[in-house]
Amino acid sequence: MAEVLILHGWQNHRPEGHWQRWLAGELGAGGRAVRYPQLPEPDAPARAEWLAALETELEGTDPAELTVVAHSLGCMLWVAHARARAAAGLTGPVARRVLLVGPPSDAVVASIAELTEFAAVDAGHEASTHIDAVAVVTAALAAASVEPPVVVAGDHDPYSPVEAEGLAARLGLERIVVDGGGHLTIEDGFGPFPLILELCA
C-alpha cells in the first residue's frame, strides 16, 4: 500500500490551514496510508530526539511504497537521517520518493542557536574539507531513496536567501521553483498545495 510520511519544520505544531495538514487529508481520502507525526519540542528541537522520532515513524514502512514530504527543518532532519545511515554503514533506500519543500540554507540554520546542529553540511565532521563533506552528504541522500530527492522551493525564500547557498544548488538536486512562494508557509498563502499532491502521485 502506498504510504506517505510528512515531516514538519521548526515551531510547527501542525496547525489547521497548513498545507501539510491539507495534504494529509487529501492523501488519506485518496486511500494512502499517511503518517504525520508531531515531532518532539518543535519550538526547541533536538537533533537526536527528532532522529529517534523519525526512526520510529519509519518502522514497518515499505521503501518501495514510501514517499517522504518534508518542509523547512524537516528537510534538514531527512538529510541528518541520511547522513547517520551512511555513517553507520547502512545500505539500501528507506523511501521511494523524497520531496524537500522549502529547505533552509545552512547559513541560516547555523545562524539560529536552536538549529545549528541541523546544518546539512557545515555542522558535519564526515570529511576534512568542505568539498568532500558536500560529496558525502550528496551520496548519503542519493542512497536513502530509490528516486533522487527533489527540492520544491519558493522564490524569495527568506530562509534560503542566496540561491548558491540553497540545498538544491549545493547538492546538485532537481529544483522546482514556486513563483511567489516565499518559504511556502500559511503566511505565504499555502493552505492547499496541489503541486505537492501531484508530486506524491
Image (spheres, rainbow, N blue to C red):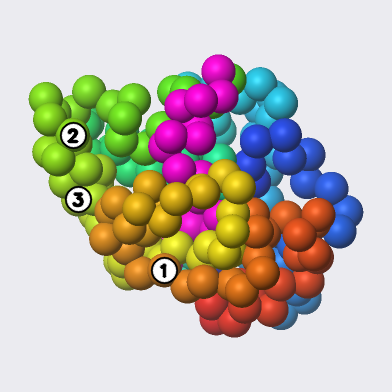
Amino acid carrying mark 3 in the image: Ala
Q: Is residue 12 magenta?
A: no
Camera sees residue 21: no
Does 9 appear above or below 181?
above
Residue 88 appears in view: yes
- Label 3 and label 2: CA atoms lie apart by 14 Å
Q: Residues within 10 Å of mark 2 (few under 14, many from 20)?
A: some
Residue beneath the point at 45% across and 50% down: 162
Q: Nearer the viewer, residue 72 or 90?
A: 72
**Quarter residue 43 falls in:** top right
> What is the magenta range?
96-113
Tell me residue 108's x, y (percent).
50, 35
Query: Which of label 3 and label 2 is nearer to you?
Result: 2
Q: Position of residue 199 (x, y in %)?
A: 54, 77
> What secondary structure is found at the residue carrying circle 1?
strand
- Residue 141 coordinates in the image, percent (x, y): 30, 51
Considering depth in this image, is 29 or 84 the residue closer to the camera? 84
Q: Which label was assigned to residue 130?
A: 2
| Residue at which label 3 appears | 139
Give yes or no for contact between labels 1 and 2 (Cβ–Cβ under 8 Å): no
Q: Mark on residue 187?
A: none
The span from disc 1 to disc 2 (Cα, nearest Å) is 22 Å
Q: Quarter of the image holding residue 189?
A: bottom right
Check disc 1 and give the amino acid type: Arg
For this view, does 8 lie left or right of residue 12?
A: left
- Residue under label 1, please give it: 175
Q: Is residue 33 left or right of residue 54?
A: right
The residue located at (55%, 18%) in the rendering is: 113
Q: Quadrant of the C terminus?
A: bottom right
Q: Tell me: 123 left or right of 19.
A: left
